[in-house]
Image (cartoon, grey):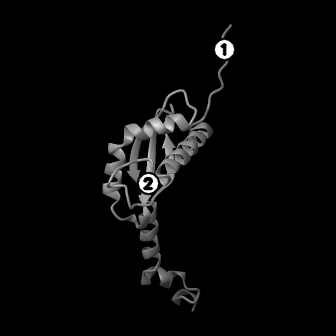
Amino acid sequence: MPRHHQKRGPAPAGGSQRQLRVGEAVRHAVADILVHGNVHDADLEGHVITVPEVRMSPDLKLATVYVMPLGGRDSDIVIAALERNKKFLRGEVARRVNLKFAPDLRFRADDRFDEAERIEKLLRTPGVQRDLTPNSDEDK
């Protein structure tokens, strides 16, 4: 008997529900590891690191971990330190998150704050402010 498969549309922009759920579990695990100082690296000491998002690949074998040091300073140093300790972090994530395979971790700087600041600066420019005021020259 032939199997009847339903044709699925494209995956949502943020990924499937499972990708989002696993990404959130990995995010919590990585954040917990960093908060408790389980990673012993001189470059990570003295840095408070935020993990705002983890994006999982569709097969759940690759996790892209977005991190941001407090204040945004030394992000390159922090990313390099996390990359050096990737094997340890992967093992810890495997112990804390119940998955068939422990995902490979890839660390990236979270640039959403920089992008938000750039947009804020654009909105504060005189040309945009002039267009946003209710009493512009076009109303007269």
Name the N-terminal-most of marks 1 and 2: 1
Q: Position of residue 6 (x, y in %)?
A: 66, 25
Q: Position of residue 54 (x, y in %)?
A: 50, 46
Counting other residues with Cα less than 10 Å from the Cα at mark 1, is it few (<14), some (14-19), or many (20 or more)?
few
Q: Residue at x 54, y 81 (%)?
A: 132
Residue named by callout 1: 3
Kindly check if marks 1 and 2 are in contact, taking CB atoms under 8 A apart as contact.
no
Residue named by callout 2: 67
Q: Residue at x 45, y 52 (%)?
A: 37
Label 2: element kind: strand
Residue 14 visible within the image = no
Establish if 103 lies above or below 78.
Answer: above
Establish if 5 lies above or below 27.
Answer: above
Classify residue 49 by image quadrant. Answer: bottom left
- Name the residue nearer the viewer: 57 or 140: 57
Q: Residue at x 54, y 86 (%)?
A: 138
Q: Residue at x 49, y 83 (%)?
A: 129
Residue 97 badge: none
Classify residue 115 by image quadrant. Answer: bottom left
Observer-side mark, 1 or 2, equals 2
Taking the image as shown, residue 52 lies to the left or right of residue 105, namely right
Quadrant housing the N terminus: top right
Q: Amino acid at mark 1?
A: Arg
Single out the residue that lies furthest toward the bottom: 140
Q: Amino acid at mark 2?
A: Val
- Name the residue nearer the viewer: 113 or 69: 69
